[in-house]
Image (cartoon, helix red, strand yellow):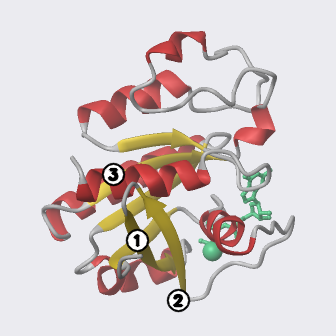
Amino acid sequence: DSKPVQVKLVLLGEAAVGKSSLVLRLVNNDFQENKEPTIGAAFLTHKCQVEDKTVKFEIWDTAGQERFHSLAPMYYRNAQAAIVVYDITRRSSLDKAKSWVKELQHQANPNIVIAFVGNKLDLVQNSDVENSADSNDEASENYNQEDNSTRQVSTNEAMAYSKNAELVFFETSAKNNINIIETFYEIGIFIFIK
Ligand code: GTP
Ligand code: MG
């Protein structure tokens, strides 16, 4: 068993998109319906096996409220990876996520691996969502585009944006534990293998 490789990772995104909930699911396999907003930032670690490597993610879960925006550079500076989160049921959060990507591309480490993650998939969920949303999933056309009206960001739009900007892309649910470990795994693959 090899020594873990440390990867500094930052989570960014509008308030209440579910950043802390994604980390809580990953680290504690727990979910809270009324999670309190993060103040400043929270630090957590999680080990994950990526092929033959043990990766220790050092996770900075930042606060999405606008008054904390100016703190973000402290957390993305030197980060090797970022997860930029939006809420698929809230259009404004997509615009905010794109502005975070732009900021990272201009201000962060030029080699940073960025994942673009649309959370709260459970709110539009129906039978065929689980096998979707992988960035290189040729079956994405099979993804149901007509799920209920709470969805405000289509999978195709976010996937096309991510492909163009060379981001890892997933739709996730912290509530139902969908595609969270996959997001971290894919980030590990991009850092160490691709
Ligand atoms: P800030 O810390 O303020 O930036 O917010 P955050 O992005 O960390 O969001 P947080 O994890 O606190 O979640 C906000 C609310 O959304 C909470 O009430 C969560 O229970 C809820 N939530 C988070 N993830 C999901 C999800 O996947 N599905 C559903 N249905 N609700 C979720
Ligand atoms: Mg939070």
Q: Classify mark 1: helix, strand or loop.
A: strand
Q: Earlier in the sequence, mark 3 or mark 2?
A: 2
Query: In the rendered structure, are the residues bearing label 2 and label 1 in contact, judged by CB atoms less than 8 Å apart?
Result: no
The image quarter in which residue 38 lies: bottom right
Vertical comparison of 85 with 129: above or below: below
Tell me how far mark 1 sits from mark 3, CA to CA. 10 Å
Mark 3: amino acid: Ile
Give the labeled residue for mark 1. 55
Look at 51% across and 14% down and name the residue there: 139
Give the labeled residue for mark 3. 189
Q: Classify mark 2: helix, strand or loop.
A: loop
Measured from the top left, where is residue 44 in percent x and y?
55, 84
**Is 107 on the left-hand or right-hand side of 136?**
left
Q: Earlier in the sequence, mark 1 or mark 3?
A: 1
Look at 25% across and 63% down and name the residue there: 104
Mark 1: amino acid: Val
The one nearer the camera, 86 or 26, is 26
Mark 2: amino acid: Gly
Q: Label 3: how many residues lie within 10 Å, few (<14), some (14-19) or many (20+)?
A: some
Tell me how far mark 2 sits from mark 1, CA to CA. 25 Å
Look at 50% across and 48% down and name the residue there: 117
Give the labeled residue for mark 2. 40
Q: Is residue 102 visible?
A: no
Query: In the rendered structure, are the residues bearing label 1 and label 3 in contact, judged by CB atoms less than 8 Å apart?
Result: no
Vertical comparison of 136 with 59: above or below: above
Q: Label 1: how many residues lie within 10 Å, few (<14), some (14-19) or many (20+)?
A: many
Q: Classify mark 3: helix, strand or loop.
A: helix
